Image: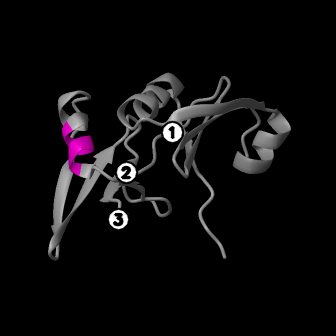
Amino acid sequence: MTKLNHIGVVTNHPKRLLDFYTGALAFTRSQEITLSKEIVRSIFNIRKEATMVKLVKDKTCLEVFWFKDYRLKPRAKDTLGYNHFGIEEEKRELLCQKLRRVFHIKVTKVKRGGHYNYFIRDPDKNIIEIKEAHI
């Protein structure tokens, strides 16, 4: 059986992104490591050191990377590849209300058939779908 192990996000603004995921979405920091130039070149084809912080919430793992002395260019809107990832919340409506009221995050509600899908963006404009967890 294959299952998704983690999602990696690369940023130029680590504090802002870490604050978002730990504050708004209640992830917890579980690990921080520095990756050597050699490892970073092998993974990202960038010849710089990088830092990776692992964030966890329930069984979801997110790895946030940033590079020492290196700025990434923003992705174009019409670029192929990663588009969004989804999380499940037992109390989706309460989370969405909190995101709007406390964190002033725009929550987009999209009707699809007989139900709604909810989407937000993190500070780097990555799209996150919020699904209702079925227990």
Query: Can residue 49 be seen from the camera position used here?
Result: no
Could you tell me which residue is drawn at 23 percent across and 27 percent down?
102
Of callouts 1 and 3, which one flags the residue occurring earlier in the amino acid sequence?
Answer: 1
Instruction: State left or right for residue 129 relative to residue 44.
Output: left
Relative height, residue 32 to residue 62 (above, below) = above
What's the colour scheme?
one colour
Residue type at mark 2: give it: Ile
x and y percentages locating residue 91 in the rendered image: 28, 49
Residue for point 66% across, 76% down:
1
Tell me the element at label 2: strand
Relative placement, left or right, of 9 versus 32 is left
Q: Give the residue pinned by disc 3.
A: 134
Q: Position of residue 106 (x, y in %)?
A: 21, 40
Nearest the eye: 55 or 43: 55
Front residue of 78/43: it is: 43
Query: Looking at the image, do the residues carrying marks 1 and 3 touch, with CB atoms under 8 Å apart?
Result: no
Between disc 2 and disc 1, the foreground one is 2
- Element carrying mark 1: loop
Based on the displayed image, in which of its 4 quarters is residue 121 positioned? top left
The label shown at residue 73 is 1
Verify whether residue 111 appears in magenta: no
Badge 2 or badge 3: first in the primary sequence: 2
Which secondary structure lies at badge 3? loop
Q: Which residue is labeled 2 in the image?
A: 128
